[in-house]
Structure formats: C-alpha cells, structure tokens
Image (cartoon, rainbow, N blue to C red):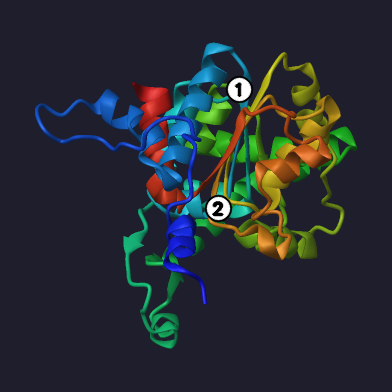
Amino acid sequence: MSSTKNIEKQLFKKSVELGKGKVKGYSFEGQFNVKEFFESFKSTGFQASNLGSAIGLCREMRRQKAKIFFGFTSNMASCGVRESITYLVKNNLVDFLVTTTGGVEEDIIKTHKHFLHGDFEANGAFLRGKGINRTGNIFIPNERYIWFEQFVKPVFERLLEKQKSTGKPVDNVEFVQELARELEGKANCEESFVYWAFKNKIPLLCVPLADGAIGDHIYLFKKKHKEFLIDLIKEVEVLYDSVLNADKVGAIIIGGSVPKHHIMNACMLREGADFTVYINTGIEAEGSNAGANPEEAKSWGKAAASKKAVKVWCEASIAFPILVAAAFKL
C-alpha cells in the first residue's frame, strides 16, 4: 500500500506552464462588441478555438490574395447556408466552386419555391404518402422536382442541338453554365449562387453530374436521344489549370464527399493548398475522406506542410455563417 507521502507526491506532481495563453471566453458585461466577440473564439477552447483559427486563416487568405477554392455538399443548399454561399459568390469573395448535383439543382429549385421546416422524427411512410421528401428536418414537396423537370427540358434540347451542329459532345462545365443561363431573367434568380457564379464568371463544377434529379433527367433524355453525350473531362482540366495557375491557394471545404476530394486532390499538383479550412463532423477513425483531417492531407501533399490548416469539428449550419460573418463581412 502506498504511503500518504507517495500519494501526495503523485497528486501534487510538479508542473510547468505549457500552452499558448490563457483560456478565456467573451465577457458579456458592458456594451456588446461583435468584433471582440468573434476574436474571443480563439481563446475559448474546444471547437470555438478551431473556429477562431479558421476565421484567422480565411482572413489571411484574403490579405495574401490567395485564390479561394470553396467546396460544399448539397445539404448546404438544402438549408439556409445557401444564403451565405450566395453572398460570397455575388460579392466575388471566392474564386472557384465545387459542389454536388444536389447543390446545383436545389439552389435552382429554391428560385421557384422555398423548402419548408419539418421534423427529424417525422414518419417517413406518412410523408411519402403526402408527396413530401425529407432532408433532416427540412421538408421538400415533390412539386419542387416536378417544376425542375420542366426547367431543365429546354436546357437539354439546346445542348443537343449544339452537339448536332458542332459534332462534339457538350461538357459538364458548359452544362452547368447553361442551367444558369436558363435562370437569367426569371423571378428570384439573384437569390441563386448558380446564377451569380455564371454572372461573375466564377467556375462552378458539379460533381458527380449524373447524380440526383439531374442524373434522372440525363437518363430519361438519353433514352429518347441516344446520341446525346456529356464530356466529363472538362471539369478536371478547368480545376487543375486553376490550381496550377494560382500564386497561392486557399481551400475552404464544408463536409466531405466528392467536392472535398476533388479540390484537395488537385492541390497535390502543387504540393498542397497554402491555406486549408475544413468544417465537418466526420471522424478519422473510419478512414473516410470526410473524416480525414488536415494532417492526413499533408501526408498526401494535398495541404502544404505548414500550420496554416485547421478542421472545425462542427455542424456547418452553425459554424459556416459565423465564419462568413467574421472573415468576409466585418
């Protein structure tokens, strides 16, 4: 049995002052100062400190005029983060966009009618009977997709005519641009990041193009027009050229999936992005692309071997609007 003296020695082991400064949150005494509030994240600890680091890195990207590659999954268009994305694109605060098919089609659909608040626990069979699709706690009536089918029909027809006249297949970059062109002049088009990317000549890649409702319509259109082809190589050329021609690269990526890998894989050509910010809740233990942290990216040469990289482990509908407010609005 250990003596009292040994126990005390173990409990009161001598220590050193190791760390990067005191842990301290924002004091709400006195008049509220939004700038100081955001600055306090860095010293708060836990994921608030990571978000504070992400804010600092995004500010540094802008100061150093890095070319900002912004990737996000479709659920960001499903929810109200869409408005934050539109702000960035409309005001030329990012230089390159990569999203999934759902991101493009849901952004466009919302120019027709909004999605509705629902419930995570809603009965799925009941919703199916009512023609309601559920994404988390967001309800999307099937009417929205019926409208989208009518929206894309003239796009397919124009692209097929172009293919016939040129003798060449259309490419996937052109396909997305044509969707944006179809939006021009329509009600609420200025709420759309697809529209603003087209108007501001910001490249917008949709990967994989043949997923989601767009994939359904490609399938149905091709059944009637077997000669219709879409070249999927163009997006790789556009992305890689942009990465290689940039003086400095900043990557801001929400979620995992193809957008994250597409951008970071392209950055291997230049020994990594100079600045890397991830926001997602993926865990590294399963070895997934979503869960992979910046240190893993450094091992591949996707992120530069510097300390200018951070992952914010947080649901993005909370973290991303804060990031936009602190790094792109103030």
Q: Could you tell me residue 316's position as x and y percent?
A: 46, 49
Q: Residue furthest right?
A: 167
Q: Could you tell me residue 326's position as x and y percent?
A: 37, 28
Horizontal side of residue 312 vs 293, given as left or right: left
Q: Residue furthest left?
A: 30
Q: Could you tell me residue 55's position as x and y percent?
A: 45, 30
Q: Kindly indicate the quadrant of the structure image that contains residue 33.
A: top left
> Residue at horizontal 48%, vertical 25%?
56
> Residue at horizontal 11%, vertical 33%?
29
In this orientation, which residue lies closer to the viewer: 84 or 164? 84
Horizontal side of residue 50 vs 121, given as left or right: right
| Marks 2, 1: nearer the viewer | 2
Horizontal side of residue 49 vs 247, given as left or right: left
Q: Residue 74, which numbered label?
A: 2
- The kind of secondary structure element at disc 2 is loop
- How would you rate the neighbour count of disc 2 (Cα within 10 Å): few for under 14, some for 14-19, many for 20 or more? many
Q: Earlier in the sequence, mark 2 or mark 1?
A: 2
Q: Is residue 272 above or below residue 288?
A: above
Q: Amino acid at mark 2?
A: Ser
* Cβ atoms under marks 2 and 1 closer than 8 Å: no
Q: Which residue is mark 1?
A: 201
